[in-house]
């Protein structure tokens, strides 16, 4: 079953996703959104209390985690959201008026590689034709302003954007699920680590979107909810990602806005482990992080429910 006091294998994470869908068929269903390069199914759990009773469909929140496989804290956050939404009946109101689509670990090949071979692997595990090195940075491979800045065309770099936009099955899987559902998706959240940041587009260049004030304000609601419940002293910065962090094109958050036209899109950089480990967050920190992050997710939900 799911656990938040140790890091799970990919197979265990997906067994949990499938078990939830089996045990709660009236509110959860599992979809295979694609296969990784090495052929592993990438799963998404759809959570819905039922169709809208009005003529407008319910707004949907889309969440993914694990784009960067070394950021181990991200998939547990997504799994905890699933557990709380589906298995904790005191949270029933959270799925009443809003649908959820959650892909808890979208880079299975890379994730397995971080567990067997190289803990700090970031990219996927494909060797593209003619390339010297393995791995494409999935968060540089999305097709909006691809390769504009902060991305590399050299395969051995950590930020290698791939031979072309959406060259990778893992990024295509996200794209191909979102596009047919884009009109319903009102919020895109992608979980990464680290840095305690809630970042919003644009990320390809230091430019604000026309709704930057909304993005800032709603991000701050989430940050406040996290911080006020934090047992580990989390302190989030809410900001435009290219201005505050660095410009980086081809990330999923920009694509969600630029191509899928989802107005609210955030990259959440979760807390890190203590120096010098950073990505290697200790297992005892999983529970406090997932719990406080769920408070932030509830703040996002509240806004979506009220606004749409
Ligand atoms: O560089 C990234 O892909 C993200 N940071 S991480 O440390 N998790 O690698 C930040 C992405 C922010 N979004 C955009 N630049 N569009
Ligand atoms: Zn990342």
Image (cartoon, rainbow, N blue to C red):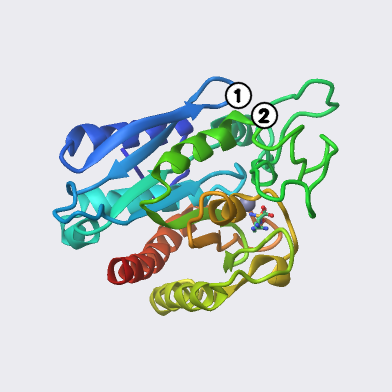
Instruction: Report if the beta carbon of the residue with label 2 is closer than 8 angstroms to ligand 2.
Output: no
Residue 60 vertical position relative to residue 7 in the rendered view, above or below? below
Q: How far across and how far down the image is residue 140, in percent? A: 70, 45
The label nearer to you, 1 versus 2, is 1
Q: Identify the secondary structure beneath mark 2.
A: loop
The disc, 1 or 2, on the residue closer to the chain's N-terminal end is: 1
Quarter of the image with the N terminus is top left
Write down the residue under mark 1.
37
Q: Residue 282 or 197: which is nearer the viewer?
A: 197
- Neighbor class of circle 2 (other Cα within 10 Å; few <14, some 14-19, many 20+) is many
Q: Let me know if residue 5 appears in the view.
A: no
Q: Residue at x 74, y 24 (%)?
A: 127
State whether residue 216 appears in this view. yes
Residue 267 position in % (x across, y down): 56, 59
Q: Is residue 38 above or below residue 257?
A: above
- Left or right: 233, with 139 as reference point: left
Q: Give percent across and percent down for residue 206.
A: 73, 68
Seen at 52% across and 54% down, the residue is: 191
Residue sitting at 48 percent across and 62 percent down? 263
> Which is more toward the observer, 146 or 17?
146
Residue 61 relative to residue 129: left or right: left
Q: In the rendered structure, are the residues bearing label 1 and label 2 in contact, judged by CB atoms less than 8 Å apart?
A: yes
Dot 1: element: loop
Q: Is mark 1 within 8 Å of ligand 2?
A: no
Q: Which residue is mark 2?
A: 125
Residue 98 picture quarter: bottom left
- Compare residues 285 and 107 and report the one nearer the observer: 107
3D distance between C-alphas at marks 1 and 2: 7 Å
């Amino acid at each position: 079953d799911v656990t938040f006091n140790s890091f799970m294998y990919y197979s265990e994470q997906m067994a949990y996703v499938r078990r939830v869908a089996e045990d709660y068929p009236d509110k959860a269903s599992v979809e295979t959104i694609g296969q990784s390069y090495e052929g592993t199914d990438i799963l998404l759990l759809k959570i819905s209390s039922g169709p809208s009773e009005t003529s407008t469909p319910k707004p949907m929140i889309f969440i993914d985690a694990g784009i960067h496989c070394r950021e181990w804290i991200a998939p547990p956050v997504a799994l905890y959201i699933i557990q709380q939404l589906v298995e904790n009946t005191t949270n029933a109101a959270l799925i009443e008026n809003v649908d959820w689509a959650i892909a808890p670990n979208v880079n299975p090949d890379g994730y397995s590689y971080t567990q067997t071979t190289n803990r700090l692997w970031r990219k996927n595990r494909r060797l593209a034709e003619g390339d010297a090195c393995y791995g494409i940075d999935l968060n540089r491979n999305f097709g909006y302003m691809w390769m504009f800045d902060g991305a590399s065309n050299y395969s051995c770099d950590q930020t290698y954007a791939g031979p072309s936009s959406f060259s990778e099955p893992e990024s295509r899987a996200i794209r191909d699920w979102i596009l047919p559902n884009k009109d319903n998706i009102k919020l895109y959240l992608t979980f990464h680590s680290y840095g305690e940041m809630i970042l919003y587009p644009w990320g390809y260049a230091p430019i604000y979107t026309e709704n930057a004030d909304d993005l800032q304000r709603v991000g701050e609601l989430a940050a406040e909810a996290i911080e006020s419940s934090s047992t580990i002293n989390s302190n989030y910065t809410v900001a435009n990602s290219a201005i505050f962090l660095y410009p980086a094109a081809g990330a999923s958050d920009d694509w969600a806005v630029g191509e899928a036209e989802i107005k609210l899109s955030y990259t959440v950089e979760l807390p890190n482990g203590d120096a010098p480990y950073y990505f290697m967050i200790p297992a005892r920190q999983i529970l406090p992080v997932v719990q406080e992050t769920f408070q932030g997710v509830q703040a996002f939900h509240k806004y979506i429910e009220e606004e749409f």
